[in-house]
């Protein structure tokens, strides 16, 4: 099975697409730029969604749902917001079709033109703040902590499964606060939630920081982000949290009566992650044998494959496997027993290895006699014989080891591919020939950032939190700089 797809070295982009398609995560749709998320891929999203939802509710947030259609006039209320999304908007202009005059198809009914055109949701700040105006009246209504699980449409010209599609799934948090300090605290808190999830569930190390003005979310005063490094050295923005100040409150006239009796505008945040996290999982951990999944997000954590020659042997193995399966499941571990007789064990080994199942157990008549099983780890491809006694605890410990190993492996890769550049020539050489994260001085101007991007295709990923201050000179202009920013080519 591993022979019919690209390796990372041969063609990293094709390797990624091959894994996504051949591991049954997703496929392209007949709708331009859109994807079909297949059951195995959606099962990963469900695990991502379930854990994040717990984290959001544990921090006081509630789920709600808002319309997918947004009146066009709403976008004009916040100038920087509309400027940031105008080129990606899909617009609904009519509400009815009719048969064409030749009877061979349908055409738009021009008599069914909308009085006001509707934008198909590219993000929900405007429609949500229209509702917040009705929900918020006094300080007693604050903080208002809302999350929405939804689909998003952004008319991307160049698409790639999970990483950038015209429609994708995400969650978006939207909160309102009485003070600037509370809103900033919320923005930082939710970024920490994302970082916790990325590192402890996705086994993917991330750097937390603040975006430059160029890379800031449209309509935000500050954007915080988590940045991860993929195995080709490119950066991937894995989550963002935005301090919106009072921009949307002023645009939609959302005021509250304070304890002091004054009428003030509320302070806002928004934050989100999307199905792009599945793409991050693929690129952060997978290898030339296929998908590699961290145990905490694997739809199937353990697969048991029987080895047998006839129906009697299968029955004997099954009688031993079922109580073993139940014992492992009692530890909260998902187990699949694949006793299909339509495929040979070797084919099944390849299938589950390619799909990234963390642990594979093989058991046959000889194992039953000896009280053993053969266990294969997906992360290292190592095989070992284990005693069946107390197998559920052994599996539990092994899954924990695999989770930690994937994180440490990704962290070591990031450290190995992180560099410092002190001159323009050194910077260009690192970006072009080594890739990864490059820490370099920058003079803080939009013009310099644009010039660096235009020549090298590298962008400022973030200025890390707690970034050490050091006097230096901008790599391009030579102007004074007090700290380094992280540059990289990115998805």
Image: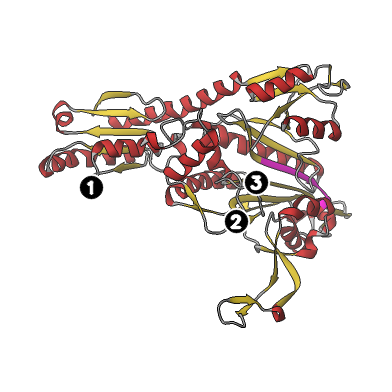
Q: Secondary structure at mark 1?
A: loop
Residue 256 makes an appearance in the image: no
In terms of sequence position, does the residue under pointer 3 or pointer 1 come before the other?
A: 3
Q: Quick one: which residue is furthest to the left in this view?
A: 312
Q: Secondary structure at mark 3?
A: strand
Label 2 Cα neighbours within 10 Å, binned few <14 / some 14-19 / many ≥20: some
Please, is residue 181 above or below residue 390 in the view? below
Q: Mark 2 sits on what residue?
A: 151
Q: Secondary structure at mark 2?
A: strand
**Residue 327, image x and y in percent?**
28, 38
- The label nearer to you, 2 versus 1, is 1
Q: Which label was assigned to residue 342?
A: 1
**Residue 262, image x and y in percent?**
89, 54
Magenta segment, principal secondary structure? strand
Residue 316 makes an appearance in the image: yes
User: Where is the C terminus found, in terms of image quarters?
Assistant: top right
Between the residue at mark 3 and the residue at mark 1, the CA separation in whole angstroms equals: 43 Å
Q: Are marks 2 and 1 in contact (CB under 8 Å)?
A: no
**Residue 53, image x and y in percent?**
56, 47
In terms of sequence position, does the residue under pointer 2 or pointer 1 come before the other?
A: 2
Q: Mark 3 sits on what residue?
A: 272
**Colour theme:** secondary structure
Q: Which label was assigned to residue 47?
A: none
Residue at position x 45%, y 51% in the image = 38
Label 1 Cα neighbours within 10 Å, binned few <14 / some 14-19 / many ≥20: few
Label 3 Cα neighbours within 10 Å, binned few <14 / some 14-19 / many ≥20: many
Region of the chain picked out in magenta, as a range: 240-247
């Amino acid at each position: 099975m591993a022979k019919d797809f690209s390796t990372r070295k041969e063609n990293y982009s094709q390797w990624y697409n091959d894994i996504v398609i051949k591991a049954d995560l997703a496929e392209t749709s007949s709708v331009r730029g859109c994807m079909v998320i297949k059951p195995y891929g959606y099962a990963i999203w469900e695990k991502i969604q379930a854990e994040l939802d717990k984290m959001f509710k544990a921090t006081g947030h509630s789920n709600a749902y808002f319309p997918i259609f947004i009146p066009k006039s709403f976008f004009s209320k916040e100038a920087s917001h509309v400027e940031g999304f105008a080129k990606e908007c899909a617009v609904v202009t009519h509400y009815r079709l009719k048969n064409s005059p030749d009877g061979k198809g349908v055409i738009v009914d021009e008599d069914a033109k909308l009085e006001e055109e509707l934008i198909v949701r590219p993000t929900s700040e405007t429609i949500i703040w229209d509702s917040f105006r009705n929900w918020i009246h006094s300080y007693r209504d604050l903080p208002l902590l809302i999350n929405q699980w939804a689909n998003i449409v952004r008319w991307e010209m160049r698409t790639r499964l999970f990483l950038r599609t015209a429609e994708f799934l995400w969650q978006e948090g939207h909160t309102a606060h009485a003070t600037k300090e509370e809103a900033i605290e919320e923005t930082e808190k939710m970024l920490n939630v994302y970082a916790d999830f990325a590192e402890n569930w996705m086994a993917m190390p991330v750097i937390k920081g603040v975006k430059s003005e160029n890379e800031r979310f449209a309509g935000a005063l500050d954007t915080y982000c988590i940045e991860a490094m993929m195995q080709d050295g490119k950066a991937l923005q894995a989550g963002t949290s935005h301090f919106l100040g009072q921009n949307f409150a002023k645009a939609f006239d959302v005021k509250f009566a304070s304890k002091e009796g004054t009428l003030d505008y509320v302070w806002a945040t928004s934050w989100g992650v999307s199905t792009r996290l599945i793409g991050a999982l693929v690129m952060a951990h997978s290898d030339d044998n296929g998908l590699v999944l961290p145990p905490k997000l694997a739809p199937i954590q353990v697969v048991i494959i029987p080895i047998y020659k006839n129906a009697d042997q299968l029955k004997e193995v099954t009688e031993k496997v079922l109580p073993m399966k139940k014992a492992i499941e009692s530890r909260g571990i998902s187990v699949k027993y694949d006793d299909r007789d339509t495929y040979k064990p070797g084919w099944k080994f390849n299938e589950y290895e390619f799909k990234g199942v963390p642990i594979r157990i093989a058991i046959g008549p000889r194992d039953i006699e000896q009280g053993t099983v053969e266990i294969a780890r997906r992360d290292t491809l190592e095989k070992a014989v284990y005693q069946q006694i107390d197998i559920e605890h052994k599996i539990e410990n092994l899954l924990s080891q695999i989770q930690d190993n994937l994180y440490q492996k990704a962290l070591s890769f990031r450290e190995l591919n992180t560099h410092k550049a002190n001159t323009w020539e050194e910077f260009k050489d690192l970006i072009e020939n080594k890739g990864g994260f490059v820490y370099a001085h920058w003079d803080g101007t939009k013009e310099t950032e644009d010039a660096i991007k235009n020549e090298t295709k590298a962008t400022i990923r973030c200025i890390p939190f707690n970034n050490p201050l050091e006097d230096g000179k901008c790599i391009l202009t030579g102007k004074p700089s007090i700290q380094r920013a992280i540059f990289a080519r990115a998805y």
